[in-house]
């Protein structure tokens, strides 16, 4: 999607996929810095590790507790830190890495666009309390959900998020385990669904799916996970994580380039690459 966006805007840029083991992440970021990269995206398991590696954190990375986007910035002769794209002629005195998080906003934008859902006042069942689950929980809280129910295989992780929400968002009722009454949205932030033989991330004996439930799965490949199939069979509205991928990518694009992301171009490129549409 980024290369399609670069081409659409006539930018002589290229987005590359590179693999780096967790123990080599610091060296990889440093290598990108010295080679003049404009920025990077990070995926799991690097998002949490990068918090302690980058030179500075944007407020988004501090709030959501993870880094999925890095922008390299140069220090000008007058001491200002500016994106590297602004140093076309004179090289900067110094270069630093700045960590951002675009995942949280990407999720909220996708929920509004794909499920036509405004989150304020809603009751949400969140499955998963890892890095993605924590960011999702905090974003839902900032959006003003009324109640948030946290379900995770490791109870202590869900408890940590509950404690954080109770401290920082006292108006949001955060509970552990499945709710006793209905919810407006079920959100899967686990990896269950990536493989064909994965079990459902939802225990339907504890909380059966109903037509009133909107279900969002952060997974986008496959396009329809077992959870989404079950939700569709039950008659509920469903959406996968393609929209989140699109919107977090669009925000990263704007952080690097300073240009408005061409969302239509990027969506078409994603759909063609991932689903062959």
Image (cartoon, rainbow, N blue to C red):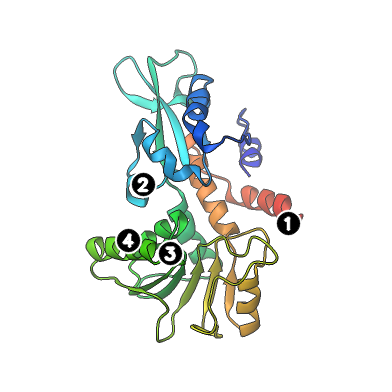
Which residue is at a point 63% across and 52% down the rendered structure image? Answer: 267
Q: Position of residue 15 (x, y in %)?
A: 61, 34
Out of 27 and 29, give the one closest to the viewer: 27
Q: CA distance from mark 1 to mark 3?
A: 33 Å
**Looking at the image, is mark 3 or mark 4 nearer the viewer?**
3
Contact, mark 3 vs mark 4 (Cβ under 8 Å): no
Q: CA distance from mark 2 to mark 3?
A: 26 Å
Alpha-carbon span between mark 1 and mark 2: 31 Å
Q: Earlier in the sequence, mark 4 or mark 1?
A: 4
Rounded to the nearest angstrom, the CA distance separating label 3 from label 4 is: 11 Å
Q: Which residue is mark 3?
A: 154
Q: Which residue is mark 1?
A: 275
The residues tagged by marks 4 and 2 sit, at their Cα atoms, a distance apart of 20 Å
Q: Quick one: SS at disc 4?
A: helix
In the rendered structure, find residue 160 and report the number of the disc placed on it.
4
Residue visible at 26% across and 64% down?
Answer: 169
Look at discs 1 and 3 and give the one toward the viewer. 3
């Amino acid at each position: 999607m980024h290369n399609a966006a670069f081409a659409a805007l006539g930018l002589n840029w290229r987005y590359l996929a590179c693999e780096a083991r967790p123990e080599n992440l610091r060296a990889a970021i440093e290598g990108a810095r010295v080679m003049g990269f404009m920025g990077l995206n990070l995926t799991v398991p690097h998002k949490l590790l990068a918090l302690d590696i980058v030179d500075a954190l944007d407020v988004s990375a501090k709030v959501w507790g993870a880094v999925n986007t890095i922008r390299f910035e140069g220090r000008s002769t007058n001491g200002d830190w500016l994106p590297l794209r602004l140093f076309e002629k004179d090289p900067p005195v110094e270069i630093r890495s700045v960590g951002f998080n675009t995942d949280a906003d990407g999720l909220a934008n996708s929920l509004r666009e794909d499920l036509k859902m405004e989150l304020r006042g809603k009751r949400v069942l969140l499955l998963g309390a890892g890095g993605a689950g924590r960011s999702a929980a905090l974003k839902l809280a900032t959006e003003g959900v009324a109640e948030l129910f946290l379900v995770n295989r490791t109870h202590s992780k869900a408890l940590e998020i509950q404690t954080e929400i109770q401290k920082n968002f006292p108006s949001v009722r955060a509970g552990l385990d499945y709710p006793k009454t209905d919810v407006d949205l079920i959100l899967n932030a686990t990896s269950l669904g990536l493989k064909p033989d994965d079990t459902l991330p939802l225990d339907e004996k504890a909380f059966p799916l109903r037509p009133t439930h909107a279900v969002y799965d952060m997974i986008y490949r496959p396009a329809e996970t077992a959870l989404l199939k079950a939700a569709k069979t039950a008659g509920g509205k469903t959406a996968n994580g393609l929209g989140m991928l699109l919107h977090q990518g669009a925000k990263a694009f704007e952080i690097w380039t300073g240009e408005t992301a061409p969302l239509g171009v990027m969506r078409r490129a994603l759909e063609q690459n991932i689903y062959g549409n």
